[in-house]
Image (cartoon, rainbow, N blue to C red):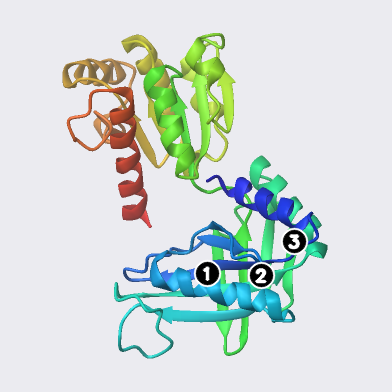
Amino acid sequence: MQPHEFWTRLADHLDTGKPAFLVVVAYSDGSSPGTAGAKMFVTRTGSQVGTVGGGIMEFNLVDEARDALIAGGVRPQCRTLWHQKEAPGETSGMICAGNQTHISLIVAPGDAGTVRRAAEASKAGAPIHLLYSPNGLTIDETENPRAVGPMEFTRTGEDWQLVESMANHRRIAIIGGGHCGCALTEVMHRLGYHITLVDRRPDVKTFAQDRCASEKVAVTDYANAGACVDWPEQTAVIVMTTDYTSDVRALAGVLRLPFPFIGVMGSVAKINHILADLRLEGFGDKVLERIHAPVGIQIGSHTPEEIAVSVAAQIIQEHEDRS
């Protein structure tokens, strides 16, 4: 689920005049099943949207949320759960090790405007932040969405605050809107990434009908594709155009920008030719070492869908290694 879809569903529920119980993972450590930024909301009937890790922990949290909504008047709280039988604090009922800290609060119908603003900002990548505190939810407008990371959590004694950037920091640019490119947009959409899909052929069926990309950009020259991507320093870029020459043009453009991950699809023979041409254009070996080629974890993938899974897995792996 895309981040903005979660907030939109919460806003839609609040617009019915009914409250919801919101739980957000502010911090996680070790083998915790819920990672920072994971969230869910629960309604008075016990229906649930999103997840904070699953298992018996989440089952119990849903029960507690329903009870809190029925009781009403529950203040926002910060709570750490330990995933082991013997722990220095409250246990979650799980034994996977590690711990996770939750922020939980009742969101009232009167908060619908704040939540709707969060949804709109998340979809547009607007430079605002959502603040969670003992006072509830508030919006903080700022000029720079990079002012804080995706999530910043502070706690001193009973005082705590969580700041969440509404701009999606999980980003990918896919250069090439063919079958493989659009298969990759489907996978990355489900993983919650902001996706920029770029092609020279705005009318080609796969590109025109793609519904998973956050934005689609048509260029006249693939050498300009990288320059069309916002936040290159936070964006993985994958080159999978229709032909060898276009791949070279696209790579020549993105190598001049600070993308943390650059991958290109193709056979070893094709990639060797691409690298040779890039050297002729003046790119040294140190720069070319930035290219993951052929992109994707080697799992024997052949179909566009299999290739998309292998590429997504490598992007997740590389992101984890950089964290």
| Neighbour tally class for label 1: few under 14, some 14-19, many 20 plus, Cα within 10 Å | many
Q: CA distance from mark 2 to mark 1?
A: 10 Å
Residue 284 x %, y %: 28, 29
Name the residue tied to disc 3: 139
For the point 67% across and 58% down, the residue is: 129
Q: Which mark is residue 132?
A: 2
Q: Earlier in the sequence, mark 1 or mark 3?
A: 1
Residue 130 x %, y %: 68, 61
Q: Amino acid at mark 2?
A: Tyr
Report the front residue among 12 and 146: 12
Residue 200 x %, y %: 51, 12
Q: CA distance from mark 1 to mark 3?
A: 17 Å
Q: Earlier in the sequence, mark 2 or mark 3?
A: 2
Dots 2, 1 in contact, CB < 8 A: yes
Image-based side of 145 in relation to 315, left or right: right
Name the residue tied to disc 1: 26
Above/below status of 303 relative to 48: above
Secondary structure state at the residue bearing disc 2: strand
Residue 317 x %, y %: 30, 48
Report the front residue among 15 and 287: 15
Regarding residue 258, the answer to whether it shows in the image is no
Dots 1, 3 in contact, CB < 8 A: no
Q: Amino acid at mark 1?
A: Ala
Report the front residue among 165 and 12: 12
